Amino acid sequence: MPQDDPWKNPKRATIHDVARKAGVSAATVSKVMRGIATVKAANAERVREAVAALDYRIDPIASGLRGENRRIIGAVIPDLESPFFGALVTGLERAAEEAGYHMIVASSRESEAREADLIARMNDWRVAGTVLVPVRSERGSGTRQLKALDMQAVLVDRVSADDRYDTVTADNSAASAAVADLLIGAGHRHILLHGATRTSKAMRTRLEGFVARANALDPSVTIDTQVSDDTRDVQRRAIKDYFEAHAGSARPSAVFSLSQHSTLLVLSELRRRAVAIPDDIALVGFDDADWMQTTWPSITAVAQPVAVMAEAAVAALLARVEGEATAFPVSRLEPCRMILRESAGPDYEMPRRFRRGG
Amino acid sequence: MPQDDPWKNPKRATIHDVARKAGVSAATVSKVMRGIATVKAANAERVREAVAALDYRIDPIASGLRGENRRIIGAVIPDLESPFFGALVTGLERAAEEAGYHMIVASSRESEAREADLIARMNDWRVAGTVLVPVRSERGSGTRQLKALDMQAVLVDRVSADDRYDTVTADNSAASAAVADLLIGAGHRHILLHGATRTSKAMRTRLEGFVARANALDPSVTIDTQVSDDTRDVQRRAIKDYFEAHAGSARPSAVFSLSQHSTLLVLSELRRRAVAIPDDIALVGFDDADWMQTTWPSITAVAQPVAVMAEAAVAALLARVEGEATAFPVSRLEPCRMILRESAGPDYEMPRRFRRGG
DNA sequence: CTCAAAAAGTAAAACGATTTATCGCTGTCG
DNA sequence: CGACAGCGATAAATCGTTTTACTTTTTGAG
């Protein structure tokens, strides 16, 4: 072990080194670093020179021990592989950075136990606030824990409203109702709803939003639902079984898939069975993705306003952190867009608010 | 501001509280917490009871200030929206956790300036080691900075080899050569290479690997390359222009797209022009994605062994961190798989090692 | 039973910043 | 002329843990 020096790294300058070099006290250096004004210009300049000469950086660990100032916000996300959360995290990071905060991200990997651990650790590290995308919903253990620790937080996606924290969600219910408008309006009376995660609040809201509107439009409509939390292979088999059991005239004329993942599973199975889309079955998916415009047919999907949600979440959190928040929590419900493409069938007369995309 | 108590959170127990309650000294509590054996069983038990009763957790900030122990590893990733890096991060997190470390993730968003900032911050937080996916290559500023700060690190993807750090990369060159085998073997003699990021080492390696093998197989082959770092819209336009300029017999008979993003762009343009795949043009993409099996035709792609890479990276890093590492850096080159689907044309006789997927 | 060595325990000194309490100085006002 | 306010600066206290250097207790051999 040649390089294994037991001494510290290329010795890092401390605030006292800077103070000595600038001929002032450590307290003065601290003031300069933190931008406090009560320092003579000449001294401030010498401090800055010393800082530059020594490559000094505040040690955030030492600083965090005494100081109350925390300019970090934490994000606890259920899944970093999903494009939706990937985009969300990117948006959060950008917004946080613009406000002068840094963000640390960790993934609960859809486990409440891991979520609990991460929240505790965020608290350990004295984050100013936490963006939580709960594994389940706002009534899960994560929210209770945040409250017990008296942490500042904002709840995003998979939530509706909370009595303490602000929430930011896509308007899943309205978007699903719009899908119902589209499909029922096009004459579909037998529709399959396919969802990949039962536990998440967002999925339930999408399902309920669709069913409520569809029944309101035509109570005679038949809605099959296939929702499970099984592994990918089991789900694949379940879809296969479903279409085998519902062949011929028993086959639904439309499918509404409740997540990007679901859309992929359904699409894959329909392709295998050589079912023509949209002639034999129309398909609408929740959650848009780049690739959906390149499939054949391209896929009509509900696009969530992920950038807006990220920005709103950080804004709400920082408003609380910086103390200018209203007393009562506010729940933001961001509207989705529906991107009409080929898989939903020929163009019907659509409300103007829906943009034609793809 | 009703709840705005200037006092600290629900007062957190300190090590001294625990010591008092257990009737021992703080040093003893510290030993118990750190699993050091020289504590009488009876005392250890009373300490553990006190810890449980008071909900005590080690304060990592205070602990980090004095102690040398760091059980955190940092990851600096260029882009969290890409499915490849999403999967990589998930794999890294899992591997780190299994080894008893925690991971903090941040995104350089393809900017060397942000990368520099993040590396400096990782050092500030005294991480045990850093997993760096460089913005450019192993010769970028990030690697120099890591060395200057004398940090432990492992370089992943977009690198070849380094004189100090271990590296882990997919074998881009071999995989691209296999694509050349496939396309040249199928008789294609005019091929377009499309790549979306010129600066990244991985892209260059893919390009060079393909060109070298193709020329070796048949020096008369024509290879057009379209590689740029422009925005999505500009690239889209560039592809359009290319195919307009290369219509009729000037049109290539195959496209090799160097990234998932590229594949999407090319596919989209070919669809718009109603070019038949694979009859008019064969398409092979680097980097597999779930959706590629659902397009029509499904897309032949090179799949990177992302889980293996993640595991290898963490293993290499921790070997160094924990001091059992060899003196010389080792560069791992993980083999890719080619997933044959419809877009490459009818099945040729393929080497056995290529799995048929889809 | 004695005594040295090993084990267990502890008070106090770090760690590197921020914050507090105080101090000297300059000018102003009564 | 003395007191006082205000500004800048600083020494020292502080944050919660780990580590050091020591003291006390236990153990085991003779």
Image (cartoon, coloured by chain):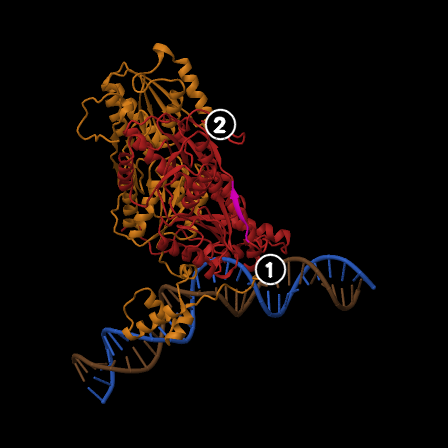
Chain colours: A orange, B red, C brown, D blue
Question: Relative to the observer, which residue lies in front, B117 or B341?
Answer: B341
> In the rendered view, does B321 fall on the left or right side of A181?
right
Main secondary-structure element of the magenta-colored stretch:
strand
Question: Residue A81: x, y in percent?
Answer: 41, 38
Tell me, for residue A1, which label it has, or none. Answer: 1
> In the rendered view, does A86 fall on the left or right side of B68?
left
Say above or below: A203 vs A9.
above
From this viewpoint, which residue is outermost toward the front? B220
Question: Relative to the observer, which residue lies in front, A188 or B313?
Answer: B313
Tell me, for residue B356, which label it has, or none. Answer: 2
- Image quarter for residue A253? top left
Would you say residue A152 sits in the magenta stretch?
no
Tell me, for residue B89, which label it has, or none. Answer: none
Q: Amino acid at mark 2?
A: Arg
Question: Residue C18: x, y in percent?
Answer: 37, 63
- Image quarter for residue A283? top left
Question: Residue A148: x, y in percent?
Answer: 40, 45
Distance in Å between CA atoms under marks 2 and 1: 47 Å
Per the image, label 1 sits on a secondary structure element best described as loop
Question: Relative to the observer, which residue lies in front, B222 or B102?
Answer: B222
Mark 2 surroundings within 10 Å by alpha-carbon count, few (fewer than 14), some (14 through 19), many (20 or more): some
Question: Relative to the observer, which residue lies in front, B186 or B343?
Answer: B186
Would you say residue B331 sits in the magenta stretch?
yes
Q: Amino acid at mark 1?
A: Met
Range of the magenta residues? Answer: B329-334
Say above or below: B153 vs A272.
below
Question: Residue A128: x, y in percent?
Answer: 35, 52
Task: Confirm whether circles 2 and 1 share one chain.
Answer: no
Q: In the rendered image, is residue A49 in sight? A: yes
- Image quarter for residue B285? top left
